[in-house]
Image: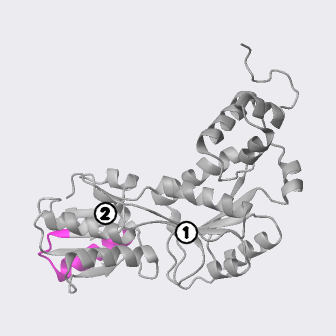
Amino acid sequence: MSDPRRTSSKRVTLEEVARVAGVSRATASRVVNGVATVDATIRAAVQNAIDATGYVPNLAARSLVTRRADAIGLVLPEESRLAGDPFFETVIRGVMSVIGPSGVHLVLMTMDTNTRDQVVSDLRRGRLDGVILIHTDRDDPLPRQLIEANHPVVMSSRPLHPLPVTYVDVDQTAGGALAAQHLMSLRRNRIVTIAGPQHTSAGQDRHTGFLDAVADPDLPWTEGDFTRESGETSMVHLLRAHPGLDAVFAASDLMAQGAMTVLRATGRRVPQDVAVVGFDDSSAALACDPPLTTVRQPVADMAAEMARLLLARVADPDAPPTRVVFEPTLVVRGSA
């Protein structure tokens, strides 16, 4: 049998891809155009045929037919939040795993004073087909602006204000409860927590889930911003106010890493003197000494789902909003 890959300079056609995949041209076209409703087995067969034949989509011709830019925006928090945070690197990889094979371009944008106007303008002028919003806060007007203009948008977390929007999240409340239940199972009874920012749904829900499971409304806590530096600052404050504490739940791995640095500097052993649990199961968890016990959210899978849902909304902007919520799991390591 001859190799189906072309050896000449002649452009491979979509018909040839369909023949190699054993599907109709229409089905092959749906896969190439990123239609999310195609069966996963068929999508894989078409993608294998694309790889085998060396097919390259004619993006210019496709844009004329579809009236699309074949580009989506990924709007990340302000640039100062991105440095050293593995969460956002994983999000980008997860999104690219879906849109890369479809030939859609990814435009990275960081939130600043001009970003909101730029996003709205790019969507209105057809330079972007849709956007994924990562970690918008309670008072951000951008989600509502996009929804009211019927632009395709997917959010990375539950909106704090009720909005008819598609979003992907982990059960943050259940994750906070998992952390609390684990620390209580270790017989820790002088527990403190470093909560995430309370102007975000992730910060609120992780905190609520933890407090409800502990059932102690007077539990000492401080508010961080998911960064390592805020974990350090919060841990210093909590140790001064509660020097006898024996357990810490930090609502992100980076905050837990910062807390462990302070604990070590003040002579506390982890986990013998103070047990520590984080949230995310990012690469920061493995960089801790000892490795961090943490609540895992499947960030790469969640990001891939965001991309699939956005492509589906681009194909059908009038489809009703979809909400996908993943389940968290506890990953036990050496810190608790």
- What numbered label is drawn on residue 278? 2
- Is the C terminus in the top left, top right, bottom left or bottom right quadrant? bottom left
Q: Amino acid at mark 2?
A: Gly
Q: Which residues are magenta?
A: 229-247
Which residue is nearer to you in this view: 213 or 120? 213
Dot 1 or dot 2: first in sequence order is 1
Q: Residue at x 69, y 77 (%)?
A: 146
- Residue marked by disc 1: 167
x and y percent of residue 88 in the render?
A: 51, 59
Q: Is residue 267 visible?
A: no
Q: Residue at x 84, y 50 (%)?
A: 62
Q: Residue at x 14, y 69 (%)?
A: 246
Q: In the drawing, does residue 227 fall left or right of residue 3?
A: left
Q: CA distance from mark 1 to mark 2?
A: 24 Å
Q: Quadrant of residue 309?
A: bottom right
For the stretch drawn in magenta, the main secondary structure is helix
SS of the residue at dot 1?
strand
Q: Is residue 142 visible?
A: yes
x and y percent of residue 174 in the render?
A: 33, 68
SS of the residue at dot 2?
strand
Q: Amino acid at mark 1?
A: Tyr
Which residue is nearer to you in this view: 76 or 260? 76
Which residue is nearer to you in this view: 27 or 110? 27
Q: Residue at x 45, y 77 (%)?
A: 201
x and y percent of residue 86 in the render?
A: 46, 56
The nearer-to-camera label among 1 and 2 is 1
